[in-house]
Each structure stands twice: as C-alpha cells, then as structure tokens.
Image: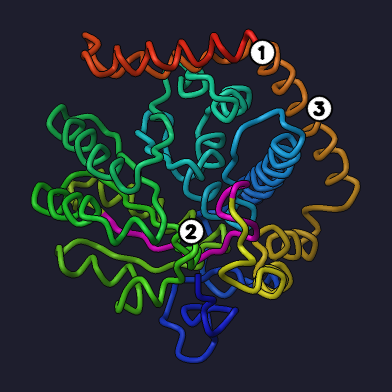
Amino acid sequence: MEKTGNPIMKAYSNEGEPEMFRVLTPDGEIVGTIDGKIDKSLMLKMYESMLLLRTFDRKSINLQRQGRMGTYAPFEGQEASQAGSALALSAGDWMFPTYRDHGAAIIHGQELYRVFLYWMAHFEGSICPEGKRILPPSVPIATQMVHAVGTAWASKIKGEKNVSIAYFGDGATSEGDFHEALNFAGVYKTPTIFFCQNNGYAISVPFEKQSASKTISQRAAAYDIHGVRVDGNDIFAVWLTVKEAVERALKGEGPTLIEAITFRYGAHTTADNPNIYRDQDEVSTFWRENRDPITRLKKYLNKEGYWNEEQEGMVLKQFNELIDAHLQKAEGYPKSNPLEMFKHVYAEESWHLKEQKQELNQILKKGVKK
C-alpha cells in the first residue's frame, strides 16, 4: 500500500483547511458561546466520560495482546466525538454503532462487561440493557445507516419523541447505503442524525484518495438536508452540534449530517499494521501533542479551578476498579461456542447453513481430539 504524501494528511493541513465549528481550542480557550448550555456539572461529566473511555480502550488492547480477547478496534483519540455525541442524546433514542463505536455505546448505557463479551465472541455482547435502544455493532460498512432511517421513520409515524443516530466513518460515505439513507431521510424528513467520524483513513486509504470532495458535510446539500462540519476533538462543539440536530429533528425539520474531524491514534484494528500505509509515529505524535480531546478540556478545567490531579487520581482508580469488575464478570462466562454463529440468522436454517454448520462441527471435534 502506498503511503500518503503528507503524513499529517491533506485534509487536516492548516493551509486552506475547510471551515469547521469549534468552541474549545487545543489550548483550552473558549472561542464560542456556551452560556446557559454547558455548565460545570456537564463539563465534569464530559471529562470523566472521556477518561473512562480511554482507560477502557487501553485495557482492551492489553487484553487482546494477552490473548484474552479477539481482534479489537481501538478508538483512542476519538473520545470527544463518541462521548460528546452520546451525552447529547436522551435515554430512549436509538443508537446504531459500528465496531469502533463501543465508546458511544458505553456512554449511552451499554454495560462494560457486554462490550468485553462482544470482543470475546459472545453473542450476549450484543444485548443492550432493558429500556435502551442500542443496536449490535455493525461490521458491514454503512448498512446500519438505512436501518437508522427505518427506526427514525417509525418513530415519526408513531409520534414518538425520539431520534435515531447512525455512527460511521469516512470510508462509509463511499458506499451506496450512505447515499440511499440520506436520500430517503431527506424525502421523508426522518429524525435521523448521521454522525460521521472522519479520522482521515478508511483502513489504509487516506481521505484525499477516496473522494474528490473537500468535506463530507458538503454532501448534505445534494439531499437538501442540514450538514455541519465540526471539530471532533472538541467535546463542547460536538455536544452542541448533536444537541441542535436532536432539537431540529424533534421539531420535524428532518435529518442532519454531521462530519466530526478526528483521528485514531492507533491501528485500524489489532490485526492491522498502520506503519505500512502512514508514518504512524509522526501522525500519532502530532495529534496527541496538538489536538488531544482530553488534554484540551483538562487545560480548560484546570484554568477554571474545576479539576486537579488529586481528583484525576481518584477517578482513574475508581474507573480501573469498575473495569476490572466487569472484566471479571465477562471472563466468568463459559468459552464462546463457534457453532452459535449459525443461530439467529434465519427462522428456519437453510440447507447450505446446515452443511456449513456440520462441517464446522466436524472440524471442532477433530481439534478437541488433538
């Protein structure tokens, strides 16, 4: 695979960078209006949410390396996009995450041990708590977007005051499902929020080699829906943008396409080697030192006297204990059975699935004999 010419990425260059909504600068300075919308309590909730997600993410990578979990998709660097968007939702809103959006799912109410179970190949990991509407992580690219339009349309027909939010990456915007979902949502003015985390790479393909469009948000114009480009590492801006999209949707003003500019510090998954397609050390260091979502909010909170190192130490200790307790619960489950993958596909098992199931069963039995 060919490396991109500019390791910092053309889309994120300071020269000629398309305009995006920002409230909190990387130096922790407020440049927008938050009066009456984001108070101290919400700020602390935002910060602690991001700390929890980063702690969980790093723990998960270590578990995968120890052989205690399967392939894992890390999201470090994207905490503001995931936490900020999820915190702007109401409890009854529908969430359609991808395999990288378990951070958003956790903030929306998914239990930590369920997320561990998912990455340990248990189908129980896709079950959300009673009263929540969190769909299983979507691995096929962009398919969840049309599903989100469907539940949003149903909510509108029933007169329910709920929105549906679909998460996806920049790579999904080149799929047909993306365009079909936006078109249908625009025609029927469904209360759908299309939340794109543009981290600059569709696995190994940099954005400038995927699309001639300067931005993803500009594509909203083709469907005559609202489009916004936001600093995805600024949790204030993300929260305000999603909150406004929810309010617009509930007033019957239709869907919103949000492009959150962010970056994943690590590999696409633990099975990926990003050094093959980008200068991993350079880009990761650049984003960590200049645009980290947690650092910028911490700078602001410290300046305002809302946060200190003692609080951080106590909270991190609590989070580590919480995560360990959920891990223990997940590891207390029996080993997952590969034959379970054939369940819940069809009401009646088709002949070819029966053959595949029988073949796998024979392979597993041989493996046991060894």
Does residue 34 belong to the magenta stretch? no
Residue farthest toward the bottom in the current orientation of the protein = 15
Give neighbour class at mark 1: few <14, some 14-19, many 20+ (Cα, 10 Å): few
Q: Earlier in the sequence, mark 3 or mark 2?
A: 2
Left or right of residue 266: residue 315: right
Q: Which residue is found at the position 28% from the left and 56% from the top?
A: 256
Query: Would you say 41 lies left or right of 321 here?
Result: left
Magenta-colored segment: predominant secondary structure = loop
Quadrant location of the C terminus in the rendered image: top right
Residue lying at 80% horizontally and 61% vertically, measured from the top left: 302
* First reached walking from the N terminus: tag 1 or tag 2: 2
Q: Is residue 212 above or below residue 361?
A: below
Q: Nearer the viewer, residue 54 or 159?
A: 54
Q: Disc 3 designates what residue?
A: 321
Q: Quick one: label 3 or label 1, which is nearer the N terminus?
A: 3
- Asked whether the beta carbons under mark 1 and mark 2 sit within 8 Å of each other, the answer is no
Q: How is the image coloured?
A: rainbow
Q: CA distance from mark 3 to mark 2?
A: 33 Å
Q: Secondary structure at mark 3?
A: helix
Q: CA distance from mark 3 to mark 1?
A: 39 Å
Q: Is residue 368 left or right of residue 179?
A: right
Q: Nearer the viewer, mark 1 or mark 2?
A: 1
Are there few (<14), some (14-19), or many (20+) residues within 10 Å of tag 3?
A: few
The relative height of residue 30 versus residue 64 in the rendered view (above or below) is below
Q: Report the residue at 19% width, 51% height from top.
A: 254
Residue 370 circle label: 1
Q: Amino acid at mark 3?
A: Glu
Residue furthest left in the image: 187
Which range is magenta? 256-271
**On the image, numbered disc 2 is attached to which residue?**
203
- In the rendered image, residue 326, in percent from the top left (x then y), is placed at 70, 21
The reply to whether dot 3 and dot 2 touch (C-beta < 8 Å) is: no
